Amino acid sequence: MLSQTLKYAYYPGCVAQGACRELYLSTQSLTHALGIQLIELKKAACCGSGTFKENSQLLEDTVNARNIALAEELNLPLLTHCSTCQGVIGHVDQRLKESQSTDPAYLNQVNGLLAKEGCSPYRGSTEVKHLLYALVTDYGLEKISQRVTRNLSGIKCAAFYGCYLLRAQKSMPYDDPFQAEAVENVFRAVGATSIYYRGRTKCCGWPLSSYATTESFKMAGMHIQEALAAGADCIVTPCPLCHLNLDSRQPEVEKVIEKRLGLPVLHLPQLIALALGVSPKELGLKGHIVSTKPLLEKLGF
């Protein structure tokens, strides 16, 4: 048992509250099963997903300084299950912490804007952490293994990290940005087999989808085909935007590449929660575009 309950200021992000509602539900189910307490930051704003800085770096920094300050008010780390949110908010946090010594006038400008809106100032007193790394470094893989009630040894899982989680920040203290292993280590903890393939740490194509849709779908199709060729039963991703491009758009991807794929894509907390005995219904696994039924049948459902 954990000697102390883990507690986080929970930043769910936009996608999990809309297009990927099953991610919101599965994160709640997983953390409840592990005894992790989440205090949701209901007043938090969208991180901007990297678009704010196209017009104004100050806008991106101020919006996300406010998000971080909300967690600082609780004296808790900010936890997100979105790789894009991790990349954007984590990068802002790094930049503002550096500015405390290198450019205090800029930080004063950011905090001045926050003060005008009646918001607490950014202090740089906490950290921004993705759910994946909270589970690996704070909770611990051994403890997760001890909680497994449904061993997943019958399935082969292909990780898809995406790019924001691994390379948006200047430093990656929890994993190697080009030879990542954290998700595969989670697979081992719950008994699943790890499948390695070339595209697992590359971009899914989502950032291109609004203006180069065909290229985006070709990129997604290439990764899915590589995972299938390597023997994967499913792709598992810690990024909701990767999930959208690989799962919800997979039928469109099939049309572009003129090949049948049919590879299920799971959110990371869905996979772990399955191993902990949470029901597929509670995890929203029937709401995916690509059917998870073949995968669930392999697991005895």
Image: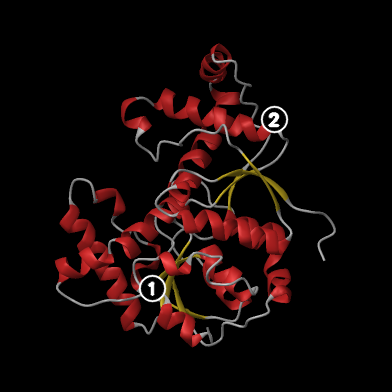
Q: From mark 1 to mark 2, how far is it between C-alphas? A: 40 Å
Disc 2 target residue: 73
Secondary structure at numbered mark 1: loop
The amino acid at mark 1 is Pro
Q: Is residue 185 visible?
A: no
Residue 54 vs 39, above or below: the answer is above
Disc 1 target residue: 264
Residue 39 lies, in percent from the top left, at: 67, 43
Residue 52 vs 203, above or below: the answer is above
Q: What residue do we see at 56% from left, 60% from top?
A: 26
Q: Nearer the viewer, residue 61 or 2?
A: 2
The nearer-to-camera label among 1 and 2 is 1
Residue 213 lies, in percent from the top left, at: 19, 53
Q: Is residue 188 left or right of residue 55?
A: right
Q: Quadrant of the N terminus?
A: bottom right
Q: Is residue 180 left or right of residue 50?
A: right
Residue 50 vs 175, above or below: the answer is above
Residue 73 lies, in percent from the top left, at: 69, 30
The amino acid at mark 2 is Glu
Q: What residue do we see at 56% from left, 75% from top?
A: 187
